[in-house]
Each structure stands twice: as C-alpha cells, then as structure tokens.
Amino acid sequence: MEDIVNALALFANYVAVPATAYGAQLALGALGVTLIFGILRFANFAHGEMMSFGTMATILVTWGLQDAGIGLGPFPTALLALPVGILAAITMALVVDRTVFRFYRRQRSNPIVFAIVSVGVMFLLAGLVRIIIGPDDQSFADGARFVINAREFKELTGLEEGIAIKQTQIITVVVAGAVVAALFWFLQKTRSGKAMRAYSDDEDLALLSGISPERVVAICWIIAAALAAIAGTLYGLDKTYKPFIFLQILLPIFAATILGGIGQPVGAILGAFIVAFSEVMVTYAFRKFLAYLGPQDWAPDGLVQLLSTDYKFAVSFIILVVVLLIRPTGIIRGKVIV
Amino acid sequence: MTAEAEAILRVDDLTVDYGLIRAVNGVSFEVAQGAIVSLVGSNGAGKTTTMKALSGLVPRAGGAVRFAGAPLDGVTPDGRVARGLAHVPEGRRVFPRMTVRENLLLGAYLRGRDPGVVEDLDRVCEMFPILAARRQQLAGTLSGGEQQMLAIARALMSRPKLLLMDEPSMGLAPQMVDLILEKIVEIRASGATVLLVEQNAVEAIRLSDVVYVLRLGAVIHRSAGRDMDESLLKALYLGHDI
C-alpha cells in the first residue's frame, strides 16, 4: 500500500506538478494564438517572440525595482513589474498592427501572406529583444523558492518520496486560473466580448450589425499581447528566461492550439494540458515508479524512458502531425486551416 | 425634381467587380422615402452583389451611391449602419452560438446603452412573438423560418431608415413566406423604407411600389408594381426587350 502511495508521490513530484505549471503557461500562450486566429484568421508566428518581449520588459523593470529595494516580500518582485511588461507588450502589438498588419488587411491579403509576414515580425522582435537585453539567459526569480520542499514533505508524511512544490508553480497556476476566468467572463458577458465572438463567427454579419473591425482587431491584440507577456513571465519565473527558447516554444503552443480546435479558447486550454503532460510523461524515466509498483526486489533494467529530454519538442511535433492526419479540426471542432 | 428630393437612396451607374468578372455593370435606380422597391431578375443578374455594395460588404468599382442626402464614398459598413442602413443578407444569417436575445442586442450594437434599445426589443418581439418565447434559446436551434424572423428583427434593432432584404423568403414553407411578406408591409408601415430582392418575384411585385428588373448586371426595366403583370415579367426574365 505504501509503495503505491510512494509511486504516486513520485509521479506527482516529477510529472503532475511540473506538467500542470507548464500546461498553464502553454495554455496562456495558446489562448493568444487561438484568439488571433479566430479574429485575424492567421497563424501568428510572432507570438513566441511577443512573449519574450513582454517578459524582457518585465525583467528590466524587476531589476529596477530590486535596485530600488522595492519588493513583495516572499513573492517574486516580477509580479510587481508584470503590469509594465504587459503594457509594453500591448504597445508593441498595437504598433506592429498599425505599421505592418493593417497594410495587409487593407490589401485583403490571404491568410498565408499574413502568416509569412508574422514570421518577419518574429525575427524583428527577436532581434530587438537581443539588442536590448542580450542573448544570455537571465534568472530573475526572487522571493521564497519553495512552498514545500521534498524533505519537509517526507518528514510531514513519513513517505520515502517527497513532493516539492515551487512557489512559482503555485503562482503560475493561480495567475493562469484568474486570467482565464477573466477572459471567459469578458468573452461571454461583455458587449465587446460578444462583438469579438460575433466577428469571429460570421465576419460579414458582424459588420452588418455595426461592429467595427478595427476595434475588434485592436481588442484582440491587446488581449493576446497581455496573455503573451503573462505566459512568458510565468515561464521565465518557473524556469529561467532564455531568449532563444521562444522560437521552440511556438511548437507546443501551436500543437496545443490545433489539438484543441483552432479559434476555440476552451480547446486551447485542453490542448495545452494534453501537450504538457505528454511532453513530461514521454521524457520521464519511469524506472523507479515501476519499481514501487512491481513485486519486491524487482525493478526494470532500463530507465523506461521513451525519449530523452533533448527530444521533448518532438512530442509536440508528433501530436501536431497526428492531429492534422486524424482530426484536423481538433478536439472541439475548430476552423480547419486551409 | 421633387421625386429626386424625396429619394432616400440614389444609385448611379454602380459597377462592382469580383476579380476579373464584372458582376454589376452600371446599375442605376432610386428608392423613394417610405417605399417598398424590388429588384428582380434571374440568377446572376447582380441583385445580391448590388445589395452587398450598398451595405459596404464588397467594394464598389465605380459609380455613385447617395444615401439620406450624403454620398457613401469611403464609409465603412459599420458607418453605414450608424447612418441608418441595415442589411438582412441572404440565407437566414444569425449568430448560431448566441441566444436570440444576444443576437437582437448585437443588432443594436452601435446604440450602446440607449434606453430605446429595450423598447425596440419589445417592439420586435411583438412583431415576431415566437422570438419572445425563444429569447434564451441559442439561435442555432431555431427552425429556418424562425431564424429568418430573427435575422430581420436583428436588422430592425438598429432602427434603420432603409432596410435591405435579400431573399427573405428563400427556402421557407409557404405559410412562412406569406408571414414574412406580411411583415415587410408592416415594417414599411412602421416608417422604414424597404429595398427588396426576391426570388419569389410575383409576390414581391404585388407588394412593391416600384420594381426594377435586372439582367446581366444592369437594369433593363423599371415600372410601378401595379403596372407589372406576369406576362411582362416572364418576357423580361426570358430576355425579350420591351
């Protein structure tokens, strides 16, 4: 019996807890991508770098606050700086929309043109970020590190395996939950939110109802950029800020978006957790876990690890390919990419 | 001259292109304040495209449109709604994942918190009692006829001066067709002007003040509704010049 509990604790520590935090970060990113697809109808490749840009702004402000001796006690100073990061990301998104995407909207360009343009924006933002903060990794988490660490957990429960929960993981889940709740309230209950859904559902009919496309587009960028800055900051707090990760992170985010059904906010969240759990589970070595569950003195010889962690992004790629082959509309039937 | 002054909509030599194809080729007509005017003609005559150009869904390639005394050049679709032009597009278009009430309120989107919106909600529900009964139901679950009523009611929620109705009776059961046509007369009685495109040409002509016959993207005939009889209409549809 105790073996089973130990196995579960082991699983929670190395899979469930980190995958939940990672899933929440992906969900925020995927929500932004899905909203942009729903309203502007293109796959925004610049979304990862928008996360990076917002996070960079948050880090710069965090450093300023730390120098000034302002903090949040046990909580990371970055939370205090986050609103500035969000504002920076929103400003950047609106500037890019006015100077770049609006031109192509007026040309009535087709979605693939928009997607390619967004690749250009992606490189531009990536370059800008590296000029400002440099190409190096930055660690900016301060405050208490653990809510409970493995040793404390073991002493508390008397188990052999401990569950460590980092403070950033709790913050990630709480913030993501609050943001998602606010987003759904906005989309379901407010006049602007309903206008956005109407525009996404039937553009012509929305125009005929008097909904201004420029306003809907601006609101969409504001929300997507805010989500991006929050997602990037939470990801950076949980791990470290790596300017080069944001190109790779597009893959799990796109996989989550497509898996859930493009343009479907609920689907994006569902997809994000499926991708996160798959990624963590496929790269986790189940040897010890199985040893607990198997008979006494029996343990697998190998690591029982499907893929090395170096290949974790391959998981998203496989999910992406399988979804596109089997159910291209995603779990919640979204718009098929043509 | 007085007739011109009373026209709420004047269309002069309107042309619309779809890529390389000219869908509307120099259409001119006018709609007098408080009238019901019909555009009739066979498929591909350019009726729907004309309507879309009037509401701004498709760009105009040439010609001029004046609505309520001002040109519509460069006015966005939402700007046209604000000026009092509402369009009920072809095919019972509603927002299927929203409730009947939400659909109606989106029709009044530009009016914000205007207290008149609630009044108008009651007014359109009186006109179409079934919508009141289905208020909280998702629009996607309504029958075809009910969706058409909702589509019309949604357009009325913007308090239009001119209502463009594209094939409002298409694909509906015969009683429902009669009901919709009845409502068109009722809408005019309430003070709005109606520009109607109807496949059911004989019925449309019966209730219209003026009828324009379109063929191949141009107006080929204009007459008062009462002067148009079935044999003349047949001849025009079949392509005989009068």
Image: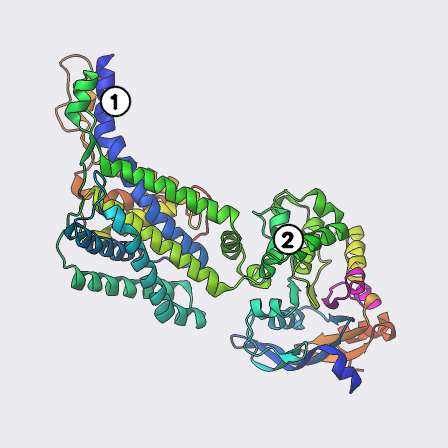
Spatial CA distance of label 1 from label 2 is 53 Å
Q: Which quadrant is the C terminus of chain B positioned in?
A: bottom right
Q: Is residue B196 magenta?
A: yes
Res A46 visible? no
What element does badge 1 sit on? helix
Q: Which residue is tagged 2?
A: B104
Residue drawn at x 83%, y 66% is: B207
Task: Please report the bounds of the magenta region as a residue range.
Answer: B186-206
Q: Is residue A125 above or below residue A290?
A: below
Q: Nearer the viewer, residue B125 or B171?
A: B125
What element does badge 2 sit on? helix
Residue drawn at x 67%, y 57% is: B116
Residue A215 percent coordinates (x, y): 47, 63
Q: Is residue A116 magenta?
A: no
Circles 1 and 2 on the same subunit: no
Label 2 Cα neighbours within 10 Å, binned few <14 / some 14-19 / many ≥20:
many
Q: State which chain disc 2 sits on.
A: B
Q: Which residue is tagged 1?
A: A8
Q: Nearer the viewer, residue A217 or A77?
A: A77
Q: State which chain disc 1 sits on.
A: A
Q: In which image quadrant can residue A128 be found?
A: bottom left
Q: Is residue A280 above or below residue A67?
A: above
Residue drawn at x 43%, y 68% is: A105
Residue A296 percent coordinates (x, y): 16, 12
Q: In which image quadrant can residue B30 be found?
A: bottom right
Please report contact status of discs 1 and 2: CB closer than 8 Å, yes or no.
no
What's the image's color scheme? rainbow
Q: Nearer the viewer, mark 1 or mark 2?
A: 2
Q: Which quadrant is the N terminus of chain B positioned in?
A: bottom right
Residue A330 percent coordinates (x, y): 42, 44
Res A111 visible? yes
- Give the side of residue B191 with respect to residue A223, left or right: right
